[in-house]
């Protein structure tokens, strides 16, 4: 059996997932098992809404309770990978193509090829088809249609993080949450550490943006005042331009109703190709919980007698 998934992000990259939520039991079990430090998402204070050139303040929490990984979500990935035998995972080795022949599959990578009895595709199905890793013509038409149309969760988003000396917005009685319909970044939240250090605000914007860092700082300044105009650093990633995140035909993958589609929860190629990204989950698709649920489903299918 072989599997392939997205490459590791470089250190310092503002990546998803940002939160996990109460009731997501698979995540909670792993957090306890690995002893991972987590902290509550900061929600104390008012929120801001910017519309039609006016900023309104809502003096009540608007964010539901949620949690953050204190050392980043990569700590959960490292915990899972650490349970595997040495040499099981190969990084910086992109899969370029997967083919089936008789009762085997061949996986071609940048470092050569190998064969296996089955393969797990832990990347969004639309990305696997768009990159040519899997040939749509080698799938049942209904599966190819679903796989090519399903969107990457948050795949068309630009994420920006502004780092400040202190979380000054908290001193103003603000939670750091802001919404701006029609603004470059429609959603802003506090991304600070558990004690407010490092102090950070982050936003989700719709790509493409000509200068997302400048647009983000300008928007934060309009929302939170002059102290927001001088961040120590701004980090930006346009996920739509990340080759291991989003398909090139991003705008054509908009069928969110296909999340958890039976065409993708059922193995293809007579049980030799398993779809295991979070977009294929019937529980919490798009979340870490959904990725874990998809993994459980896949392993259950592979280990079934």
Image: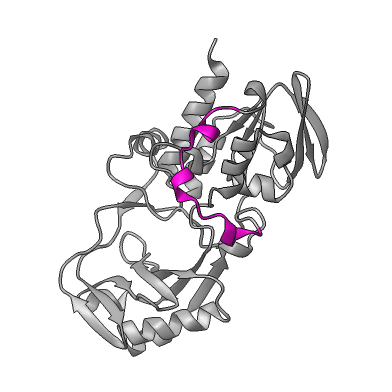
Classify the position of the C terminus by image quarter: top right
Image quarter of residue 218: bottom left
Classify the position of the N terminus by image quarter: top right
The residue at the point 72 percent across, 48 percent down is 92
Q: Which of the two residues, 79 or 181, is positioned nearer the viewer here?
A: 181
Q: Which of the two residues, 34 or 276, is positioned nearer the viewer here?
A: 276
Residue 242 appears in the figure: yes
The residue at the point 57 percent across, 67 percent down is 238
Magenta span contains residue 103? no
Image quarter of residue 288: top left
Q: Which of the two residues, 258 or 94, is positioned nearer the viewer here?
A: 258
How is the model colour-coded?
one colour
The residue at the point 53 percent across, 52 percent down is 151
Q: Which of the two residues, 251 or 10, is positioned nearer the viewer here?
A: 251
Image quarter of residue 225: bottom left
Identify the magenta region. Answer: 248-267
Q: Is residue 30 above or below residue 164?
A: above
Give residue 185's position: percent from left, percent from top.
Answer: 42, 74
Give residue 295's position: percent from left, percent from top.
Answer: 50, 32
Give residue 106's position: percent from left, percent from top.
Answer: 78, 30
Magenta span contains residue 265? yes
Q: Looking at the image, which residue sits at the far front? A: 141
Q: Looking at the image, which residue sits at the far right? A: 112
Q: Is residue 290 above or below residue 174?
A: above
Give residue 299's position: percent from left, percent from top.
Answer: 53, 24
């Amino acid at each position: 059996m072989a599997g392939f998934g997205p490459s590791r992000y470089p250190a310092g990259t503002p990546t998803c997932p940002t939160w996990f939520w109460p009731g997501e039991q698979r995540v909670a079990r792993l957090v306890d098992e690995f002893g991972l430090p987590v902290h509550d998402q900061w929600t104390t204070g008012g929120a801001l809404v910017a519309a039609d050139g006016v900023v309104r303040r809502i003096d009540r929490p608007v964010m539901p309770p949620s949690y953050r990984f204190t050392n980043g979500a990569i700590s959960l990935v490292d915990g899972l990978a650490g349970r595997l035998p040495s040499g099981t995972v190969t990084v910086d080795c992109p899969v370029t193509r997967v083919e089936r022949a008789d009762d085997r599959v061949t996986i071609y990578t940048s470092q050569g090829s190998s064969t296996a009895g089955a393969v797990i595709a832990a990347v969004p199905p639309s990305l696997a088809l768009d990159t040519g890793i899997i040939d749509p013509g080698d799938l049942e038409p209904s599966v190819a249609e679903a796989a090519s149309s399903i969107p990457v969760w948050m795949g068309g988003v630009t994420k920006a993080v502004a780092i400040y000396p202190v979380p000054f917005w908290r001193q103003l009685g603000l939670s750091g949450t802001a919404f701006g319909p029609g603004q470059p970044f429609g959603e802003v939240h506090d991304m600070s550490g558990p004690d407010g250090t490092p102090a950070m605000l982050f936003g989700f914007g719709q790509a493409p943006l000509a200068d997302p860092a400048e647009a983000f700082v300008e928007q934060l300044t309009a929302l939170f005042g002059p102290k927001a105009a001088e961040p120590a650093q701004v980090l930006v990633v346009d996920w739509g331009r990340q080759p291991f995140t989003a398909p090139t035909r991003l705008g054509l993958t908009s069928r969110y109703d296909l999340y958890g589609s039976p065409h993708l929860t059922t193995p293809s190629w007579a049980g030799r190709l398993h779809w295991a990204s979070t977009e294929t989950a019937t529980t919490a698709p798009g979340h870490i919980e959904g990725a874990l649920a998809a993994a459980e489903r896949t392993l259950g299918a592979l280990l079934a007698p």
